[in-house]
Image: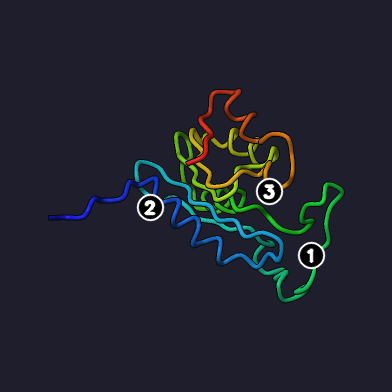
């Protein structure tokens, strides 16, 4: 008897989880997979722009400097990296799905919405991670008709 096949949702979230291990961030490792019609368009993980530095090498104890909100001042988020790489390579993001290990922050949610992505599935809550009262990014996306939910 054949084993039950995992859904694409499970496969893509597992890949996002594995990609997070590539991050050089000292504080949090986040991975993202951007798909369309069960095909991978792009992948990403949080970290500084290519060719700049690696936080775990330059600031191994405390990580890179923080911005006024306590977030990394130098790195791109996993979803930003996935979207930017896809756009750089001419991918059509309209109607695509994003799998990310941490729900999107509000700035990433605005980018996701504007890029044409239609669904976002996340593994863990950004609000819980940051000690916020709600997932602002997910709330924004759901408010404007984009499905964003925990997988």
Mark positioned earlier in the residue sequence (3 or 1) = 1
Q: Is residue 95 left or right of residue 113?
A: left
- The residues bearing labels 1 and 2 have C-alpha atoms spaced at a distance of 32 Å
Residue drawn at the location 61% of the way across and 34% of the way down: 138
Marks 2 & 3, CB-CB < 8 Å contact: no
Q: Is residue 67 left or right of residue 30?
A: right
Residue under circle 2? 11
Quadrant position of residue 46: bottom right
- The residues bearing labels 3 and 1 have C-alpha atoms spaced at a distance of 18 Å
Marks 1 & 2, CB-CB < 8 Å contact: no
Q: Is residue 82 left or right of residue 110?
A: left
Counting every numbered tag in the picture gives 3
Kindly report which numbered mark, 3 or 1, lies closer to the viewer in this rendering. 3
Rate crowding at label 2 as few (under 14), some (14 to 19) or many (20 or more) other CA atoms within 10 Å: few
Q: Nearer the viewer, residue 82 or 133?
A: 133
Mark positioned earlier in the residue sequence (1 or 2) = 2
Report the quarter where the N terminus lies: bottom left
**Tag 1, which secondary structure?**
loop
């Amino acid at each position: 008897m054949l084993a039950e096949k995992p859904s694409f949702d499970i496969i893509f979230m597992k890949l996002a989880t594995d990609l997070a291990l590539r991050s050089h961030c000292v504080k949090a490792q986040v991975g993202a997979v951007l798909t369309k019609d069960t095909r991978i368009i792009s992948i990403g993980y949080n970290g500084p722009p290519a060719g700049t530095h690696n936080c775990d090498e330059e600031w191994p104890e405390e990580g890179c400097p923080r911005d006024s909100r306590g977030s990394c001042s130098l790195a791109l988020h996993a979803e930003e990296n996935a979207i930017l790489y896809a756009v750089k390579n001419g991918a059509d993001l309209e109607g695509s799905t994003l799998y990310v290990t941490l729900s999107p922050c509000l700035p990433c949610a605005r980018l996701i919405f504007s890029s044409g992505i239609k669904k976002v599935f996340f593994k863990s809550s950004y609000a819980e991670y940051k000690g916020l009262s709600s997932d602002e990014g997910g709330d924004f996306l759901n408010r404007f008709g984009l499905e964003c939910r925990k997988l």
